[in-house]
Image (cartoon, helix red, strand yellow):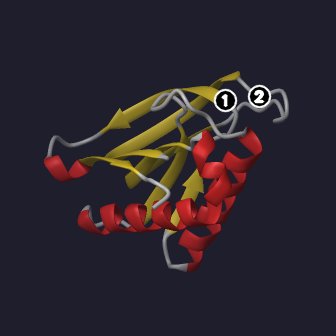
Amino acid sequence: MKLLMIYCTRFGYQTSMRTLDTVPEIDKSETFENCLVGFIDVEEKDEDNAAYIETKLIKNLKWAARKNETERIILHSFTHLSDSKATPEITKQIFDSAEERLKKSGYEANQTAFGYFMNLDIQAPGSPITRLFKDIQND
């Protein structure tokens, strides 16, 4: 899994183009303030150990959220960080489970619309801790 985390003073999205035929057609937009956005690329090799990868994802997101003093985490499917892709079903399963676990831990967790390209509005301060990259491996 590849994980790019960006702390945003403002993060918004508007669905633009559906990329998966298996998701319903929607026109959706949301805006969040003071949030950590996880740009997540679940890779094919992650499918064999999805529970472990999900736990590592959550630990990294919580750590970065604490460092940026926010309890708001947005999960965003971003399949542009690797050439390897997990199936959409496994990816969505990891996202849904991670969102639920984050909520149970006291975080305000949300997902962007899965299976869509979208217009993004990102406002992020320029500081080293606001932009972090992690290559999560099956150790």
Which amino acid type corresponds to the residue marked 1 in the rendered image?
A: Tyr
Q: Earlier in the sequence, mark 1 or mark 2?
A: 2
- Asked whether the viewer can see residue 72, the reply is yes
- Of tags 1 and 2, the one toward the viewer is 2
Other residues around mark 2 within 10 Å, as few (<14) / some (14–19) / many (≥20): few
Q: Give the alpha-carbon distance from disc 1 to disc 2, as whole Å.
A: 7 Å
Query: Where 4 falls versus 73 (above or below)?
Result: above
Instruction: Name the residue that disc number 1 marks.
Output: 116
The amino acid type, in three-letter code, at marker 2 is Leu
| Local secondary structure at mark 2 | loop
**Left or right: 87 as drawn, with respect to 30:** right
Which residue lies at the image location 62% right of the left edge and 65% below the top edge? 51
Q: Secondary structure at mark 1?
A: strand
Give the quarter of the figure containing the C terminus: bottom left
Which is nearer the eye, 132 or 125? Answer: 132
Tell me the residue at 71%/24% (across/down): 19
Q: Of 83 and 130, which appears nearest the observer?
A: 83
Residue 30 pos. (x, y %): 56, 42
> Which quadrant of the structure image shows residue 17?
top right
Horizontal relation, residue 53 to residue 93: left or right: left
Which residue is at 77% across, 45% downward?
89
Q: How many marks?
A: 2
What is the residue that sits farthest to the front in this orientation? 139
Task: Locate residue 42, reporting x and y percent.
Answer: 57, 44
Identify residue for label 2: 20
Residue 112 visible at all: no
Task: For label 1, count other residues whose C-alpha is less than 10 Å away and answer few (under 14), some (14-19) or many (20+).
Answer: some
